[in-house]
Amino acid sequence: MSSLKLQYKKQVDELCMAGCSVTAEDILAKARERQLDAAEVIDDKTDSNISDKSKGSIVKFEKAKKEKAKVNKAKKAIWKMVVAAASVLLICTTTLAATGKLSEWYDKYFGDEKEPVTKEIIKEGYLYDINQSVTDGIFSVDLIGVTGDAETPKLAMDIYINDDALAAAHDEIRLMVYILGTYQYENELDLYSPWEGHAKRDENVPNLYHMVITGPPVWMCNGEEVVVDVWQIVMDEDAEIWDDRYPNIKFRYTAPADIFYPVSYFEYEDMKFSQGGIDYYLTRGEYGPYRSELVFEYDYEGTALVGGEDNYLELEGKLQDNWLQLVDTMVLVVDGVEYPVNAEDKGYTYCDEKGEFGKKNHCNIHPYFPSVDLETAESVVIKAGDTSYILK
Amino acid sequence: MKITQDSFLEAYEKYKNTVYSVIFNYVQNIDDANDLQQEVFIKLLNSEVDYETEEHLKNWLIRVAINMCKNHARRSRYISGDAIPEDLPYEVKEDEMDVLSNVLTLPEKYRIPIHLYYYEEYSVKEIGMLLDMPESTVKIRLKRGREKLKKSLLKEELA
């Protein structure tokens, strides 16, 4: 093989020499050009009106459907409150990202112990500095930047409470934040619920809180404009001063789609997994640095789960129980190593009574497993209870 | 060390073939390889990579290149095994085999480890780290890849 190795090296070198037509100067010029473009785009966005945009590809639509289904469930517990219109001071300052702000911010507040995976992702260069600040007088929020993988994008935020008494009463505050595409924010806001994030007080600055919030990949990772609306700031119910505030704090930003760590996707067909008298069909798999995920679909009509309910809510309770029982027995076996479902975040299920988001009377279940490379694995088996199914 | 303009120029000269050849092995297309090559090095300019050694920088570049190729494949729906261009710009002398085109016909899961092993001379352990796979998997891939390569080279010799 040694002479073949030399021949291979020589041929590759020749290919590179003749094929690679990009020079270092080209790259430097392109990088400078993009920096200037980014500055112009950010300036434009500060004053721009939201415009209608196409809803994009089928994949995007599928993801949006999933997103709607997920958030609709949460919406039941979150009632939108009428906020008295008040004159608020709104100052929005936008600056071109200062190099390394997000990276330094993570180093300082979310060290290796708190967010080790995100730290590694940032080290590999998957991050985007936003550096926008908005205040309404009582609250000031800095949107530091965005990072994560293409299925788990994360926004980094600093929150200042410009009220010493209010800040002194709360070590932690909870933020409900709408994170949507421009079209969805402008036209379909009622269909969505806000995302929840917890901000913890800085160790040295009493009025300052830091937060990382995970948002919807369907809009955050598509390279288009994202609207971030800090809808509600909830103070702990147990604290001395209990209060919910509705600040007028909104951001718009656009981050390139490829700044997120890539996630691998797999489509499956005709893969049936029977358990407890129900046929689950494996439709999709994903893996990224945070987790591996499988997606199963099943028709609940005609199963033992249905019968004797007075309304859909009762059935929904049964479907939830079924998911919780099933997921606890699930184990992913990759190249002989067993990976039980993630203990902290087992995944989720959503069911569609009317066929609004998917097939009528069908449920999807999304168990989460530790991050393991399903793409390069030699063998992949999914087990639930005493049933095993070979995926690869 | 952090990237400055000078260190960027130096890194580009030193690793342009490394990055280009990995990318080409994935995408098998001169134009796409040039586009992705540019993106990888722009990412280096914009990144906060604080590399301790030259080897660290090289590994970082290869990992970014691999990830970009995977993203590119998803975006362009590129399917591994598409026809490889016949007019690739390298010369095969009379007493030589066309090793490169035979490597390029291997399935992706074999040709990337084969390339990193023979062109970059990475160890099995290093390839495992770069590709996020166990050493045992790398060994199997290299073994099967070599077997397939031998078969196709033998076929070429007999033809």
Image: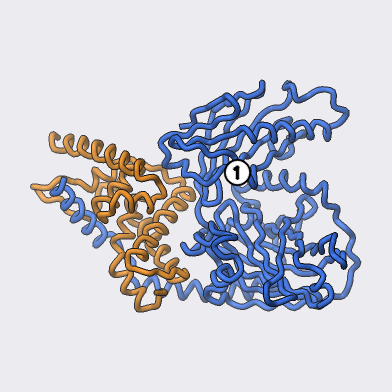
Is residue A130 shown left or right of residue B11? right
Q: Nearer the viewer, residue A112 or A25?
A: A112
* Shade representing chain A: blue
Q: Residue B147 falls in which quadrant of the image? A: top left
Q: Residue A137 falls in which quadrant of the image? A: bottom right
Helix, strand or loop under label 1: loop
In the image, what residue type sits under mark 1? Asn
Is residue A280 shown left or right of residue A184? left
Where does label 1 land, which residue? Answer: A342
- Residue at 51 percent across and 37 percent down: it is A338
Q: Is residue A96 above or below residue A270?
A: below
* Shade representing chain B: orange
Q: Nearer the viewer, residue A263 or A221?
A: A263
Taking the image as drawn, is residue A23 in sight? no
Percent x, y for residue A1?
Answer: 16, 45
- Residue at 75 percent across and 56 percent down: it is A194
Is residue A381 shown left or right of residue B149? right
Percent x, y for residue A305?
Answer: 75, 25
Percent x, y for residue A109?
Answer: 61, 69
Percent x, y for residue A265?
Answer: 52, 43
Q: Is residue A368 above or below residue A93?
A: above
